[in-house]
Amino acid sequence: MKTILFIETTKSGSSREAIKTAARLGYCTVLLTERNSFMEQYEEFPDVTRVIHVREITEDLIRTEIRRLQQQGNSIKAIISFVDPFVSMAAKLSNEYCDSIISVDALKKMEDKTATRKALKNNVTTPAFEIYQPTDELDTILNKGYTFPQIVKSAVSKASKDVYLVGNKVEMKKALKKIIKQYPVQKVVIEDYLDGPQYVVEVLVHNGTINIVAIFKQDITKKTKFIVTGYELQLNLEKGLYETLYKAVESILIDLGVTNATCHLEIRYVNGSWKLVEVNPRISGGAMNRMIEEAFGINLVEETIKLYLGYEPCLIRKYEKQIYAHYITINSYGNLLKVTGENLASHQPGVKEVYIKPSIGTIMIPPLSMGHRYGYVIASGNTSDEANENAVNAAKNIKFYLDPI
């Protein structure tokens, strides 16, 4: 049986769509997961041939499961993860067992914010930064003479969960304490806050050729955390701006040593220059794969799977549509009683997809990380503004009813 082994997934989004895609391509799909709920909800995963539950995902354990699968007649063609922090580990094993040629060292650097900054310390896109050990004295850090605002984040931060915008020493001290308490062995990064419009750039690199698949301008809610609530496709980015962006992306990926991989960059345009917020070793999660598919007819997770399998990815646009994705957050706390308006929203002008994440009984809160976005609406339009308006207006029909806590 031709088999693809997936290391972890989410219930929806890019990682989940990758498994569905592999099944559609005719592969036996095996999912290795730490999540008990996936075993209990097995009927919700009809495209997964087999789920293997483990207490903790480690390289040694994966090797054991690979041997067991091979003994059972599975011919493993690729080992893939679209979920942090397993991307580089899966790629390493895929290179070893399946003759893939993925850029493991580069992916590993992307998984660690301190390793990323060190690798790019001489790159012009890198903001001023400092890296600290969790054992460093707080007073020593605070007396470095920082000009505020600054960004404080854990080396393993993801989905804005452990990233703090601080405006003074008191806020910096509070953020440092939070991070060190939660990650007592992880380094901490403090870097200049970048003030300018932010973009996410989805990239696939094949045999050293850098392909920018899609560019989205991000609408960001900025309070204590940064929450992306909107993605606006940049279908006609001004030529000069695109050229400088491509050069910036190219310089970053060359410095990281990327020759075969999919990744995405979050990058800001600051006073006429591109500055890197972070780079991640996979396609963005959530609705990103669906957005790209609606915009261009390209299934990026499918092309990533092809890359792992040793085939040449096809990134030719079948068409071009203006797309906007609006994410839904709430400002209240409570247990979810019911959701209404999903069907009405799906029938609004231009709407391509409506997704509601939480199930009844879920405890819902205002957004502290990207994980607290509770759904999205993807819509198209003749212009960017029309696509935005269609998505936002459709989302207004969706109501969450909560039992306050």
Image (cartoon, rainbow, N blue to C red):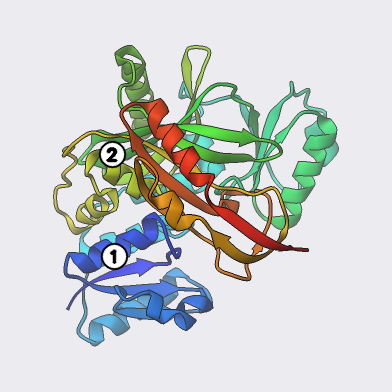
Q: Residue at x 28, y 51 (%)?
A: 102
Q: Quadrant of the C terminus?
A: bottom right
Q: Residue at x 56, y 25 (%)?
A: 127
Up/down of 75 relative to 357, above or below = below
The label on residue 402 is none
Q: Is residue 200 visible?
A: no
Q: Position of residue 396 (x, y in %)?
A: 54, 44
Up/down of 87 relative to 139, above or below = below
Q: Residue at x 59, y 46 (%)?
A: 155
Q: What whole-number distance in Å separates the C-alpha atoms at marks 2 and 1?
A: 20 Å
The label on residue 20 is 1
Within-10-Å neighbours for mark 1: few <14, some 14–19, many 20+: some
Q: Position of residue 182 (x, y in %)?
A: 71, 56
The residue wearing badge 2 is: 295
At label 1, the amino acid type is Lys
Q: Position of residue 399 (x, y in %)?
A: 58, 54
Front residue (pair 292, 272): 292
Q: Answer left or right for 223 relative to 243.
A: right
